[in-house]
Image (spheres, rainbow, N blue to C red):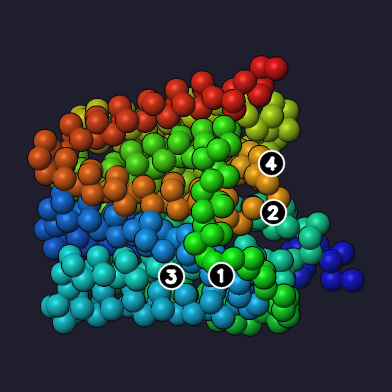
Amino acid sequence: MAECIPLRRQRDYRLLWSARAVSETGTEISRLAVPLTAAALLDATPVQMGLLTAATTLPYLLIGLPAGAYVDRLARRRPVLVGCEAVSALAVLTAPLAWLTGLLTVPWLITVALTVGVCSVFYRTASLPHLSSVVADHQRTAAIAGFQSVYSTASVCGPGLAGLLVQALSAPLALVVDAASFLVSAVCLRSIRSPEKAEAAVPRGSLLTDIREGLRTVMSHHVLRALIGTGVILNFASAGQMALYVLFAVKILGLPAGVVGLLTASFGVGGLTGATVAPRLAARFTENRVLLGAVVVFPLEFVALASAHGAPSVLVPLLMIAYALSGLATVMFSVCYGAIQLRESPPELLGRVNAVMTVATMGVMTLGGVVGGVLGEVIGLRPTLWACAAIVLPAILIVWFSPVRRAVTV
């Protein structure tokens, strides 16, 4: 039977895995190429950089909850996945074409980011239910672990590749590779043969009723509330820092695009290590203890970037170490966060709880990006980075003085 065959030998899983691997690598290229285009070639202001960062996550805030409820009612999710990748490819491709014709502006890039963000919301919502049509029940954990390795590997290879492409082609033309990656992903998904399960979830009430039930469950559960509070604060601070990271690295520290990509790749190396060791540490110490330890490391990257100065020969290695440790802690935190969320969520509400948690933690990045950009304009880049570092500290307190900690001391 197919479910007895190892995942690596299953054609459809390989196609699904390949689609994610190619698409995520392309996304990592855009993550560097888009802000570099805005900062270095279009002379974007800090406010514009903040809006550009916010545009990638705004769709989660606007349509995340209804998108989750809507996708749960579909009998077939694969066409949604294929369509999202195809639309994303066309949107990204308009940026290099506009650059070649002299039409590219920061608002154009923001529009592209918004379009890709909308597609990302629907893709992320539909991908997990679709997995059940491709992978047997007892192999889903291994399949999800395989996707986690994709994300970490892409964060390692993507930025370095992005730096090289930007140096060789220019930042706008590097986006052609991202557009191509979306198209390859769409072809891989379209080639999957596994029939989708025809049964869609039968709604018991309106979309609004489903959304309210998910919100009520999260906010009334002490552990879930602590997790979402911690995630919101961390992502708010991260988005504020992300909005100014490239601008600060290029304008203040004077680092070339290749080195900026190298720093981001260092984060991915740490993340790949975290994906490997997190399950082992969790099995030995429990997910709660690993999460509590990981969250303590988060301020390191923020402080390292805010205080960065001096000769690149000393500065770059120190930042690489800080980013690698941050990547390690981030992935370990994310793995344990997801495991605790899954364990604490009522089985019949898993989808809605996940939608609430995702919308809150991703949607707040919109506000964080805008605030970071505005503060960068008003008080300066370095003071804003110090403010982001300070914002991280309450996240440590929330999770350490919550039932997450008490659960491991009993």
State the residue lying farthest toward the right: 1
Q: Mark 1 against mark 2, which lies toward the viewer? A: 2
Q: Earlier in the sequence, mark 3 or mark 1?
A: 1
- Left or right, residue 209 beside residue 391: right
Q: CA distance from mark 4 to mark 1?
A: 23 Å
Is there a contact, CB below 8 Å, between mark 4 and mark 1?
A: no
Q: Residues within 10 Å of mark 3 (few under 14, many from 20)?
A: many
Is there a contact, CB below 8 Å, between mark 4 and mark 3?
A: no
At x 67% / y 69%, what residue is drawn?
201
Amino acid residing under circle 4: Arg
Q: CA distance from mark 2 to mark 3?
A: 26 Å
Q: Where residue 247 appears, x then y in whole percent?
A: 20, 48
At x 56% / y 52%, what residue is drawn?
213
Q: Residues within 10 Å of mark 2 (few under 14, many from 20)?
A: few
Q: CA distance from mark 4 to mark 3?
A: 29 Å
Q: Earlier in the sequence, mark 4 or mark 3?
A: 3
- Left or right, residue 99 beside residue 194: left
The residue that mark 4 highlights is 343
At x 66% / y 24%, what residue is drawn?
407
Secondary structure at numbered mark 1:
helix
The residue that mark 3 highlights is 119
The residue that mark 1 highlights is 71
Compared to residue 118, the image places residue 383 above or below, namely above
Q: CA distance from mark 1 to mark 2?
A: 16 Å
